[in-house]
Image: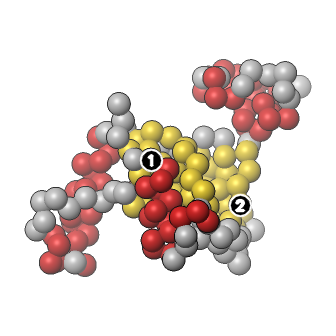
């Protein structure tokens, strides 16, 4: 059973972010504690399970960072990266794609675009098989489709 999960945590619409945590309450706590929100003012949506091997990779990167930026904590063998905000390398490993469109930062992960406008406002929208399933209730539920089924379905719509 995987230990860590990636969450999209929403708060005021400007501080929304990706957080790695064991559960939604922990993910919400990271955002609440760092930005002064009450935990009840946050919402965490689970995106994907993180393969266990990434935990050690994250810890190694954090220890390396600590040696330079926080040497007093670098020798602590119980030092761990997570729960905390997701780094870009992890999002890339999990299949995220990034782009800037009309000065708007966008991250695509699992058929959802997580976007940040120039003014900092965040929003999300579905694309691909997930969006098609939302608009067509007669299709199989998105969560039970395999990725290949979703791609085949999307390709068949694009060919019409």
Q: Is residue 42 visible?
A: yes
Rendering coords of residue 107 (x, y %): 61, 55
| Residue identifier under label 1 | 23
* In this rendering, position of residue 64 left or right of residue 159: left
| Mark 1 neighbour class, 10 Å CA radius: few under 14, some 14 to 19, many 20 or more | some
For image coordinates 17% across by 72% down, the residue present is 73
For image coordinates 43% across by 55% down, the residue present is 26
Q: Give the mark toward the camera: 1 or 2.
A: 1
Rendering coords of residue 146 (x, y %): 60, 23
Q: Is residue 61 visible?
A: no
Secondary element under disc 1, as helix, strand or loop, is loop
Q: Is residue 81 above or below residue 23?
A: below
| Residue identifier under label 2 | 123
For image coordinates 89% across by 25% down, the residue present is 160
How many numbered marks, from 0 up? 2
Quadrant of the image occupied by residue 76: bottom left
Q: Earlier in the sequence, mark 1 or mark 2?
A: 1
């Amino acid at each position: 059973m995987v230990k860590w999960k990636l969450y999209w945590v929403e708060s005021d619409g400007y501080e929304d972010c990706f957080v790695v945590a064991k559960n939604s309450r922990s993910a919400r706590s990271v955002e609440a504690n760092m930005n002064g929100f009450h935990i009840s003012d946050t919402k965490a949506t689970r995106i994907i399970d993180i393969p266990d091997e990434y935990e050690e990779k994250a810890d190694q990167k954090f220890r390396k960072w600590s040696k330079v930026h926080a040497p007093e904590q670098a020798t602590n063998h119980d030092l761990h990266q997570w729960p905390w905000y997701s780094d870009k390398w992890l999002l890339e490993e999990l299949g995220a794609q990034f782009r800037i469109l009309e000065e708007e930062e966008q991250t695509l992960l699992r058929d959802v675009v997580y976007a940040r406008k120039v003014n900092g406002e965040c929003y999300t929208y579905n694309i691909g098989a997930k969006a098609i399933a939302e608009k067509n209730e007669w299709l199989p539920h998105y969560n039970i489709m395999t990725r290949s089924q979703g791609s085949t379905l999307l390709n068949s719509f694009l060919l019409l």
